[in-house]
Amino acid sequence: MEKREQLAKIFPQTMRKMFLKDSFEFNKLQEIRLRTNKPVIISYNNREYYVSNNGKLQTDSTDAYLISKREMKETMEFVSSYSLYAYEEEIKQGFITIQGGHRVGLAGKVVVEGEKVKLIKYISCMNIRLAHEVIGCGDKIMPYIVTNSEIENTLIISPPSAGKTTLLRDIIRQCSNGNSFLKGISVGVVDERSEIGACYMGEPQNDLGIRTDILDNCPKAVGIMMLIRTMSPKLIAVDEIGSKEDIEAILYSCNCGCSLIATIHGSSLEDLEKKPRIKELIERRIFSRFVILDKTYGVGTVAYVLNEKKEPIYDRNKNSYIKL
Amino acid sequence: MKLIGSILVVVATTLIGEYYANGYKMRIKYLMEMHRLLQMLYSEVEFSRGVLEEALLQMERGVGNGYKQFLRELSKGLSVGNGKSLEEHWKEAVYEYLHIPYLEKEDYEFFLSIGEALGYLDYEMERRTIAMYIERLQKKIDMLEKEVSNKCKLYHTLGVTIGCMVVLVLI
């Protein structure tokens, strides 16, 4: 099924028809924002547009298509494949991953029990973030994170939406399949937010390589332990580390002889050193490579690659810039 | 000749009585099958928490022939996802693929109402809703089973009696 049609399945009839019109290129579509009784807003080619009643993209909000409460309910029914009950854990986290690996962020009335989110009901806002795999985006980074055919423990640092998960995904694929820098190794992925593999019914929708085992929707700390005990990975990959449990599991995995590659939100190494838990990881030299991304020349610009002594082995200001 | 004719009439009406008695028992059988289907749905929601489309295919393997096609086609309909609600998909599948002659109109209405209630509920609500339907169906089956011997006797007796009466009238 074509990607456009696959995504169209989550929309109610009217929107589906508009969406299936060839008035825009699917590959340039980044986000679709739905809010009850508000205009549908689309991020397309790094710009924001409204969708007109006849399905055209426009910058003017007059004649913009408004999504009704009933349509939001229907959309939720389609997003959850008529099985809202099956997505309760995901809804608690605020998103559902749909076929194609696209992520639907949800907002509405949050029911809290103790300090934990029990459920989100009366969902009135959705943000459909489209997954675009960039095969080969890690090519230019591989020489910096592989030494003597061994992958270095690497931490990818970037602000949100700067391409860290996209880069991580491609590095996983390359390590798993093997490339000119290293032979293929077994990779264990703990995909807590279903962003790396974008699994749908347990099956990764993104290419993670032939030697990759994935635990989907699994807490990182638990997943790392499970993988080490059961799948004997040579490399463990996780996205967005930060909690105390994550750090403990990472320390454990490093003592087990596994290499590790992880991502974290941040703008620089100094920024991370302000966080005590991460500081500990840096000081103990758990990571021997730090890849820092920013958006200077667009999403996925590599700013620096640092070694374990925090010395730059790649510097955007000195070398020709790398864009993923 | 009259004797043979009379015997034939009585045998025919007795068989009709037997047919109705059997139909009554078959209705219970298919309602029990429906009960089993709902229990499987409950288990799928409770334990596997798979999406409905998948759950229906799993259930197809465990139910009798009467409901198999309904489950298969409903699952297919949901996977196509043509913008219809679960209620609409369910209704279509019932009308097109669920043809059990022993079930009565009220049984079909009960079954249709299940489709109206599912699809948009959270885990706890979905579970409780299915449990409620199971309970309602169980009560119905219990009531029908309680009357099964009386009803069967009645159909048999009526079959023979009506046959005899027809013979008397004809003679």
Image (cartoon, rainbow, N blue to C red):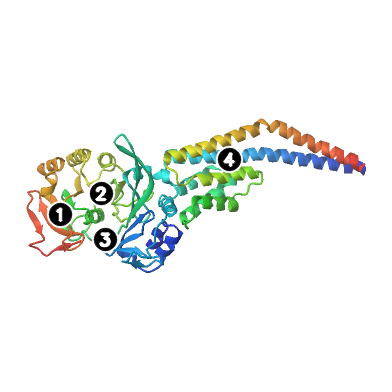
Q: Position of residue B149 (x, y in %)?
A: 70, 31
Q: Secondary structure at mark 3?
A: loop
From the image, tell me which residue sits under label 3. Answer: A135
Kindly report which numbered mark, 4 or 2, lies closer to the viewer in this rendering. Answer: 4
Q: Quick one: quadrant of the C terminus of chain A?
A: bottom left
To which residue does mark 1 refer?
Answer: A292
Chain under callout 1: A
- Mark 1 residue element: strand
The quarter holding residue B139 reads top right
Q: Hey, what amino acid is under mark 3?
A: Ile
Asked if marks 3 and 2 fall on the same chain, the answer is yes
Q: Which chain does tag 4 point to?
A: B
Q: Give coordinates of residue A217: x percent, y percent.
A: 32, 45
Label pair 3/4, CB-CB below 8 angstroms: no
> Chain letter of disc 2?
A
Foreground: disc 1 or disc 2:
1
